[in-house]
Image (cartoon, rainbow, N blue to C red):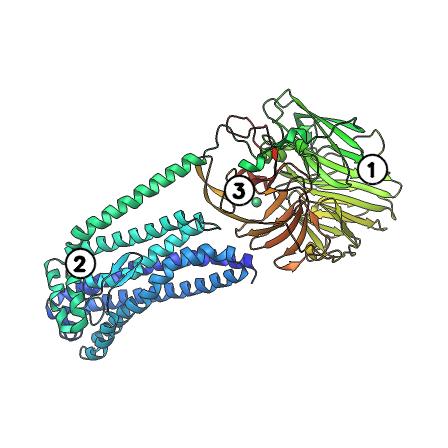
């Protein structure tokens, strides 16, 4: 089973464990009460002495009670057995998770499981035999009053009552009196103790799953354990007190007959006899004080965490402390000189008309979505002027996947101040690498990109297809074929496919293409979720991933592709005589048709494993630094408020540690997804070379800037630190980025004069 499946299954089992133990605890308490009521109705002090004989004596007079007693006992025993079973299943799952990686199992193995498996084990030994015995004796005595065989039941009862069991801070004192089931009243309820602890332990496990990630935070883990212990103790006391009150006076007799059982039980007896209301006076005060202390600590700790998690008024991101020394500011890391190609993009609201005629209100560059496709030639110095004419929105331009100088990365509050309405900013960088990229605003990028502030950016070969002076090349056709950009985007809730600078198609876009033409489709996933692509009608190659060519990519036929959010795939093929259909997300009515004629039925072949495509190349073995990013979702404090956040190493932005690297270093990064959602990870300013996924070495060579780490997956990638700056790294499910999954990678000695604090008006994510 894949680790992702194990994680999903473990969630279900975790809930089952909690539910079963809680149910078992309630049933065991009920059984214990029913049993002692049954026993007390026999009104013989002997009852408490030796359950066996008295049971036989009283059996005939209390038969109806014994029936219900038997029923509740059977239910208790059944639930207890079930709880033990699901707990055992969880142990197996967690061990399997530990084999997949310690990241997946640490919190489960160190915190969640002991809280339920420990008391569970005690319950199996101490508690389970009681209802079982009660059930069988009750039934036996109901059927044949004389057949209760006290002598048979007795020895095992004695065995069960050896010693007190301390578990989770609750002393589970053993009753002495019971020879059959729960007749020891308070004592019997005490035997239910481990079940109660396991019940709270199961609930504690749910709390662990919600709040604890990797690495395990000791304070939070300790608090949950204390909570479980405290709640168990309180419940035991409460139920013991209420029970004693209900049954009344004879409680005092509880201790008295213990002697009848002999030796080892004598010492236990007195403790049990005080187990009623009296316990709640002496021990009660201690546990009440303890509870108050724990509660106060939790409140202070929680309050302090909330306070300290608020976004400070001023926040300067980048390397901490010493690593900034003798720094160069990101503003100095910029390109100068006379640009070879200049564009101007104006951000403004506009009504966009989709191919079908449907109109959508959008935030646009130059009045369209996607914004104008920017095509340049390799080697050119490019300048893009951004003018903001949005009435009420700050805007920037981020060059997704392109290794621009840090000062042009477009991250508000890190590499520049967001461009306010009416403002301008000129980005300048050398297009030294060809390939398919895109640009988008990077101040509150989730709403900005969703509403339309993005466009395609393509760097063609030095003598490539760009027609000089044409900044919005449409259907660029060079001497060697057709070359199109295809942006997949959901605009105003409508899934669309935008080809070049045509209006986005909310259906099938069509491109007349002559047979024999060599075609390159540059496809970008600009939503927060991955895109499934199917190309039907021709064999094709996945020529480039995230702007980087693969080596000897094989011909694909009947294979679908999954493209990570933010990622780009270049598909190449020679146009056949029949039409070719590119479909998106397995919808036959959404995509791109090349050639004439009726569209073919979209193929539904298996997904290509891109880590096993392209040539195998020797991968680097020596690294200057190793980093681990464990991705997860948990309850965390975001700017002072609790939220189900997306975390890295258990933290949320801006609390995630900023790794500091040196220029020239090769960094090995291990990414682990221990959550249930896919995270398209995107480091700015760099590509990473994929080394392995789930332990299997990758081919390609696969250089990516946006790659999907699916639940349970472990990716190892190499990042060559060759572009000094302060670089944002985040999940490109931009909603996740806004919910914490954002951090920074800083080069030693690089600083930022910009401010990302609460008062800054910048929103880097
Ligand atoms: Cu397209 Cu920070 O990303
Ligand atoms: Cu994510």
Name the secondary structure under disc 2: loop
Figure check: 268 above or below 473: below
Q: Where is residue 656 in the image (x, y as percent from the top left)?
A: 52, 41
Figure check: 311 above or below 283: above
Q: Nearer the viewer, mark 3 or mark 2?
A: 3
Is residue 456 at all visible to an observer of this figure?
Answer: yes
Q: Where is residue 23 in the image (x, y as percent from the top left)?
A: 33, 58
Q: Which of marks 1 and 3 is nearer the N terminus?
A: 1
Q: Which mark is residue 275?
A: 2
Q: Earlier in the sequence, mark 3 or mark 2?
A: 2
Residue underneath mark 3: 657
Q: For this view, does 282 lie left or right of residue 531?
A: left
Name the secondary structure under disc 1: strand
Q: Is disc 1 in contact with disc 3, using a CB cutoff of under 8 Å? A: no
Crowd tier of the residue under label 2, counting other residues whose Cα lies within 10 Å: few below 14, some 14–19, many 20 or above: many
Q: Where is residue 222 in the image (x, y as percent from the top left)?
A: 37, 50
Between the residue at mark 3 and the residue at mark 2, the CA separation in whole angstroms equals: 51 Å
Q: For this view, does 291 lie left or right of residue 407?
A: left
Is residue 8 at all visible to an observer of this figure?
Answer: no
Between the residue at mark 1 and the residue at mark 3, the CA separation in whole angstroms equals: 44 Å
Depth check, front residue: 622 or 645:
622
Q: Residue 476 carries which label?
A: 1
């Amino acid at each position: 089973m894949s680790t992702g499946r194990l994680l999903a299954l473990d969630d279900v089992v975790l809930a089952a464990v909690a539910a079963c133990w809680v149910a078992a605890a309630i049933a065991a308490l009920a059984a214990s009460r029913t049993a002692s009521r049954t026993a007390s109705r026999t009104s013989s002090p002997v009852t408490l002495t030796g359950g066996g004989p008295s049971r036989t004596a009283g059996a005939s007079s209390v038969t109806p009670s014994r029936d219900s007693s038997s029923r509740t006992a059977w239910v208790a025993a059944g639930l207890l057995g079930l709880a033990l079973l699901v707990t055992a299943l969880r142990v197996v799952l967690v061990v399997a998770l530990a084999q997949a990686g310690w990241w997946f199992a640490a919190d489960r193995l160190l915190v969640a499981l002991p809280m339920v498996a420990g008391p569970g084990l005690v319950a199996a030994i101490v508690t389970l035999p009681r209802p079982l015995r009660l059930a069988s004796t009750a039934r036996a005595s109901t059927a044949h009053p004389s057949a209760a065989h006290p002598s048979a039941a007795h020895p095992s009862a004695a065995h069960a009552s050896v010693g007190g069991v301390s578990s989770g801070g609750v002393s589970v004192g053993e009753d002495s009196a019971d020879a059959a089931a729960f007749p020891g009243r308070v004592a019997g309820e005490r035997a239910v103790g481990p079940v109660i602890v396991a019940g709270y332990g199961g609930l504690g496990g749910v709390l662990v799953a919600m709040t604890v990630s990797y690495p395990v935070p000791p304070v939070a883990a300790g608090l949950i354990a204390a909570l479980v212990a405290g709640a168990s103790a309180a419940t035991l006391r409460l139920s013991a007190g209420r029970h004693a009150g209900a049954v009344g006076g004879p409680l005092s007799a509880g201790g008295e007959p213990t002697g009848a059982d002999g030796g080892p039980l004598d010492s236990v007896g007195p403790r049990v006899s005080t187990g009623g209301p009296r316990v709640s006076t002496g021990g009660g005060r201690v546990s009440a004080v303890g509870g108050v202390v724990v509660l106060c600590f939790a409140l202070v700790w929680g309050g302090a965490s909330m306070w300290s998690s608020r976004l400070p008024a001023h926040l300067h991101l980048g390397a901490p402390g010493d690593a900034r020394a003798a720094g160069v500011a990101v503003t100095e890391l910029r390109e100068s000189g006379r640009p070879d190609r200049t564009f101007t993009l104006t951000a403004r609201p506009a009504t966009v008309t989709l191919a079908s005629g449907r109109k959508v209100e959008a935030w646009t560059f130059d009045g369209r979505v996607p914004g104008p496709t920017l095509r340049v030639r390799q080697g050119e110095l490019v300048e893009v002027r951004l003018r903001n004419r949005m009435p009420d929105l700050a805007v920037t331009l981020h060059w997704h996947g392109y290794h621009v100088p840090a000062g042009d990365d477009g991250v508000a509050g890190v590499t520049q101040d967001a461009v306010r309405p009416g403002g301008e900013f000129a980005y300048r960088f050398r297009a030294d690498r060809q390939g398919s990229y895109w640009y988008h605003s990077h101040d509150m990028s989730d709403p900005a990109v969703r509403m339309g502030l993005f466009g395609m950016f393509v760097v063609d070969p030095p003598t490539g297809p760009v027609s000089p002076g044409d900044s919005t090349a449409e259907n660029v056709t060079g001497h060697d074929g057709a070359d199109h950009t295809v942006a997949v985007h959901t605009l105003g809730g409508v899934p669309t496919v935008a080809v070049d600078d045509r209006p986005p198609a909310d259906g099938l876009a069509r491109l007349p293409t002559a047979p024999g033409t060599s075609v390159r489709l540059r496809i970008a996933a600009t939503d927060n979720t991955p895109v499934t692509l199917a190309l039907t009608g021709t064999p094709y190659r996945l020529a480039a991933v995230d702007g980087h060519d693969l080596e000897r990519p094989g011909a694909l036929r009947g294979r679908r592709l999954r493209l990570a959010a933010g990622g780009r795939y270049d598909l190449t093929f020679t146009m056949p005589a029949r039409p070719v259909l590119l479909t998106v997300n397995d919808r036959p009515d959404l995509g791109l048709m090349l050639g004439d004629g009726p569209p073919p039925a979209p193929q539904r072949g298996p997904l290509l494993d891109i880590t096993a495509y392209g040539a195998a190349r020797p991968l680097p073995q020596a690294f200057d630094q190793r980093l681990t990013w464990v991705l997860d979702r948990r309850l965390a404090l975001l700017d002072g408020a609790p939220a189900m956040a997306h975390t890295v190493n258990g933290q949320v932005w801006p609390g995630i540690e900023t790794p500091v690297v040196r220029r020239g270093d090769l960094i090995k990064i291990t990414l682990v997804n221990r959550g249930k959602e896919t995270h398209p990870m995107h480091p700015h300013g760099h590509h990473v070379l994929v080394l392995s996924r789930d332990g299997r070495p990758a081919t390609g060579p696969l250089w990516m800037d946006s790659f999907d780490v699916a639940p349970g997956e472990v990716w190892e990638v190499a990042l060559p630190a060759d572009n000094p700056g302060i670089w944002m790294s985040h999940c490109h499910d931009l909603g996740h980025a806004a919910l914490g999954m954002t951090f920074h990678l800083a080069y030693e000695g690089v600083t930022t004069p910009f401010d990302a604090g609460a008062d800054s008006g910048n929103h880097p994510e």
